[in-house]
Image (cartoon, rainbow, N blue to C red):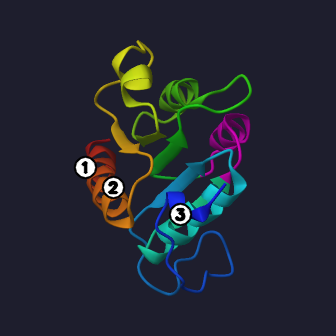
């Protein structure tokens, strides 16, 4: 897959997954993307924007981390993923464990996946592939604000 599907900035990555290059972390994102190159590009961009990132290749691993109590504020997940746990099911399972987590779905098939699926909540945020860094930044900033408000209310 070409890295041109997402704007990729050339900036050094922090050494550890929970770091954001010495800057204040905006929020921690559990990133679920089955395409390795795309996941790497998204992770790099998220770090550049000041997010801590926990990258995983599938819904099963993401759900394992959530069940272990790993802390994160946002779930950024592809909707279509191989295996038994797609993005919609993952979001539902995560919300049962952590109702305060805000979900951002990443998809290339808006009408097919959002418009007709009863499993997807229209209140979630969506990034439509291919998206730009600016679109990702705006969507995640809004989602992070919602997560912060949700956590303060608990």
Element under disc 1: helix
The residue range painted magenta reads 56-70
Q: Residues within 10 Å of mark 3 (few under 14, many from 20)?
A: few
The label nearer to you, 3 versus 1, is 3
Q: Which residue is drawn at 50% across and 56% down?
A: 29
Q: Name the residue under label 2.
A: 144
Name the one closer to the observer, 109 or 119: 109
Q: Mark 1 points at which residue?
A: 149
Q: Is residue 52 visible?
A: yes
Q: Distance between the residues labelled 3 and 1?
A: 34 Å
Distance CA(mark 2)–CA(mark 1): 9 Å
From the viewer's perspective, tell me whether residue 79 is left or right of residue 135. right
Residue picked out by circle 3? 4
Tell me which numbered mark, 2 or 1, is placed earlier along the sequence. 2
Q: Is residue 8 magenta?
A: no
Q: Quadrant of the C terminus?
A: top left
Q: In this view, does 65 lie to the left or right of 109?
A: right
Q: Which residue is drawn at 62% across and 81% down?
A: 14
Q: Earlier in the sequence, mark 3 or mark 1?
A: 3
């Amino acid at each position: 897959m070409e890295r041109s599907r997402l704007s990729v900035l050339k900036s050094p990555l922090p050494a550890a997954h929970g770091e954001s290059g010495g800057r204040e972390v905006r929020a921690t994102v559990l990133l679920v993307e089955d395409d390795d190159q795309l996941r790497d590009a998204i992770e790099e961009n998220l770090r550049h924007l000041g997010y801590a990132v926990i990258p995983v290749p599938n819904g099963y691993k993401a759900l394992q981390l959530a069940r272990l109590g790993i802390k994160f504020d946002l779930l950024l997940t592809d909707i279509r993923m191989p295996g038994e746990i797609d993005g919609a099911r993952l979001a539902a399972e995560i919300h049962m464990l952590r109702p305060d987590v805000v979900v951002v779905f990443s998809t290339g098939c808006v009408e097919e996946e959002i418009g007709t699926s009863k499993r997807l909540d229209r209140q979630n945020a969506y990034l439509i592939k291919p998206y730009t860094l600016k679109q990702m930044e705006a969507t995640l900033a809004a989602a992070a604000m919602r997560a912060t408000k949700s956590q303060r209310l608990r």
